[in-house]
Image (cartoon, rainbow, N blue to C red):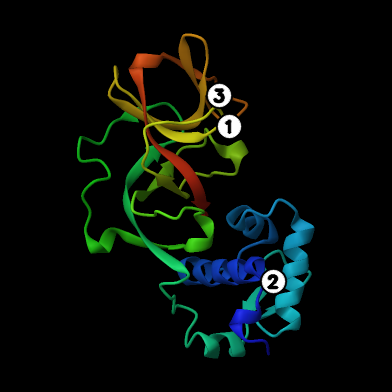
Amino acid sequence: MKQPNKLSDKQRNILDFIQIQLQQTNLPPTIREIGEACGIGSTSVVNYNLNKLATNGYIARVHDKSRGIRLTRQTLALHETAATITEDTMLSVPLVGQIVAGSPAPHPGDDFGYYFDDEDLIAVPRALVHLTDTSRLYALRVNGLSMIDAMINDGDLVILNRQSTANNGDMVAALLSDRNETTLKHWYAEEDRIRLQPANRAMEPIFVAKDAVEVQGRVLAVMRSVH
């Protein structure tokens, strides 16, 4: 079996994600979920790297099942247990509340996202977050289906970087200051307004004046909730 430092970056990221998914849900991820979590746009590339991991003894696959991946005894022994996560591969990120993916909901308060206890920390694969400075990361649980076409379901976790600016197309947590409500939407700055665009063809965008909306954070990654 290859040593861990012989894994490619993609393979290490995929293996890390499989481990954390198993730890949190007791179910292995699908090829599509791996691609979305690890930033790989092609399912064939995911499949290629899974086959490499299988060939080298890290995982075993059942090809006729969508979740037909399991860690081998060699991998479990290598990491002592599937739940053993090293500081090099995982981040501790505060889960600070919920964000509505639908009609805006009341803002949680001025302390939103700033105060948390150790039990509020969640383990997030470092591979999901492509930032050098991770001190401003936080997580929110999604409530609603307005971002369903962006593969974000009710109950999923979104990992955000706390920031007050956004580029067109960024997915953000937006505070509608005149209503004191928050929502999860794609951000678009137009001539004299901001368009908060849902990723759900059944829902209409929200239009607000530029001085009536604030960016609270930009979404960097999504962690699936298996129902």
The Cα atoms of the two marked residues, 1 and 3, are separated by 8 Å
Q: Toward which corner of the image does residue 147 lie, by quadrant?
A: top right
Q: Is residue 129 above or below residue 160?
A: below
Q: Is residue 174 left or right of residue 188?
A: left
Question: Mark 1 against mark 3, which lies toward the viewer?
Answer: 1
Q: Nearer the viewer, residue 225 or 75?
A: 75
Label 2 or label 3, whichever comes before in sequence order: 2
Q: Residue at x 58, y 85 (%)?
A: 75
Near mark 2 (Cα within 10 A), the count class, few <14, some 14-19 or many ≥20, is some
Q: Nearer the viewer, residue 151 or 80?
A: 80
Q: Residue at x 37, y 38 (%)?
A: 163
Callout 2 secondary element: loop
Q: Which quarter of the rendered picture does the N terminus lie within? A: bottom right
The Cα atoms of the two marked residues, 2 and 3, are separated by 35 Å
Q: Toward which corner of the image does residue 204 lie, by quadrant?
A: top right
Question: Mark 1 against mark 2, which lies toward the viewer?
Answer: 1
Which residue, given by chain and number where applicable, does mark 2 sit on?
Answer: 68
Q: Is residue 33 above or below residue 175?
A: below
The Cα atoms of the two marked residues, 1 and 2, are separated by 30 Å
**Percent x, y for residue 105?**
34, 29
**Can you see residue 61?**
no
What amino acid type should be assigned to the residue bearing mark 2? Gly
Labels 1 and 2 touching (C-beta < 8 A): no
Label 1 or label 2, whichever comes before in sequence order: 2
Callout 3 secondary element: loop
Which residue, given by chain and number where applicable, does mark 3 sit on?
Answer: 203
Which residue, given by chain and number where applicable, does mark 1 sit on?
Answer: 199
What amino acid type should be assigned to the residue bearing mark 3? Met
**Percent x, y for residue 48?**
78, 67
Q: Is residue 122 left or right of residue 155?
A: left
**Percent x, y for residue 79?**
50, 84
